Amino acid sequence: MKRIFSILCLTLLLVGTLTSCGFNVPRPEIKEGKFNISVTYEHNGEIKTASGVYVCEYDGVIWYNINGDPCVNWKESFEGDIKEGGIIPICNTDDGGEIFISLLIHPEYFMGDPKCSDHTPIIRAELFYSDEQIDDEETIAGYGVKLISYEYDEPIENTFK
C-alpha cells in the first residue's frame, strides 16, 4: 500500500511540475498585428513592386525553445503578393534555378517581444537550385534581377504580463 501511495504522490508531483512550466511566461497584451511590406525590384530592366501584409497572431506558449525555456509562440501568414513562407517569386532561370525575394522576418520582432529584439528583418534576392541557395547580389544581377528597396511597418510596442 505504501508503494502505491508513493507512486501516486510522485506521479502527481511530476504532473504538477510539468504542467506549471509555462505559467510564468509573460503573455502579450496585444495578441495580433498586421504590418505592411513593400519590395521594389528590377527584372530585365523593368521596375516592379510587390506588396502585402504580414499578419502575426499570438498562439499560446510553447514549452521549450532552443534554450530549453518555455516562451510565447506566434503564428504568421501573408496577404497580397507575398506567398506563404515570405517568398516573392521573380522568375525561373534557363539553368534550372528559381529567383525570388526572400523575407526573413519574425513575428517576435514585429509584435514587440522583448526576448527577440535581435530579429531585425532581412530582405534579399536569392537564387535557388535543388541543391544550392545563392544570395550573392552580383550572381543574381547576372540573371537580370536586382533588389532596389523595401519598406515595412515599424514593430509595435507591446506589454507582456
Image: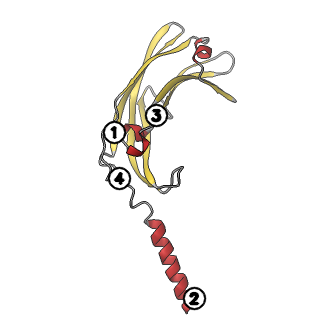
Q: Dot 4 corresponds to which residue?
A: 27
- Determine whether, in the image, residue 136 is placed left or right of residue 155: right
Cα separation between marks 4 and 3:
21 Å
Q: Residue visible at 49% across and 34% down?
A: 84
Nearer the observer, disc 2 or disc 1? Answer: 2
Q: Secondary structure at mark 3?
A: loop
Question: Which amino acid is tagged 3?
Answer: Ile
Label 1 secondary element:
strand
Question: To which residue does mark 2 refer?
Answer: 3
* Residue nearest the viewer, comparing 99 with 69: 69
Residue 1 in the image: above or below residue 120: below
Nearer the N terminus, badge 1 or badge 4? 4
Q: Which residue is mark 3?
A: 105
Cα separation, mark 4 vs mark 2, equals 40 Å
Q: Which residue is mark 1?
A: 33
Pick whichever of labels 4 and 3 is earlier in the sequence: 4
Q: Residue at x 46, y 10 (%)?
A: 47
Q: Hey, which residue is sitting farthest bottom in the picture? A: 1
- Residue 139 in the image, given as x and y percentages of width and height: 62, 15
Mark 1 surroundings: few (<14), some (14-19) or many (≥20) residues within 10 A: some
Q: Give residue 20's position: percent from left, percent from top.
A: 43, 66
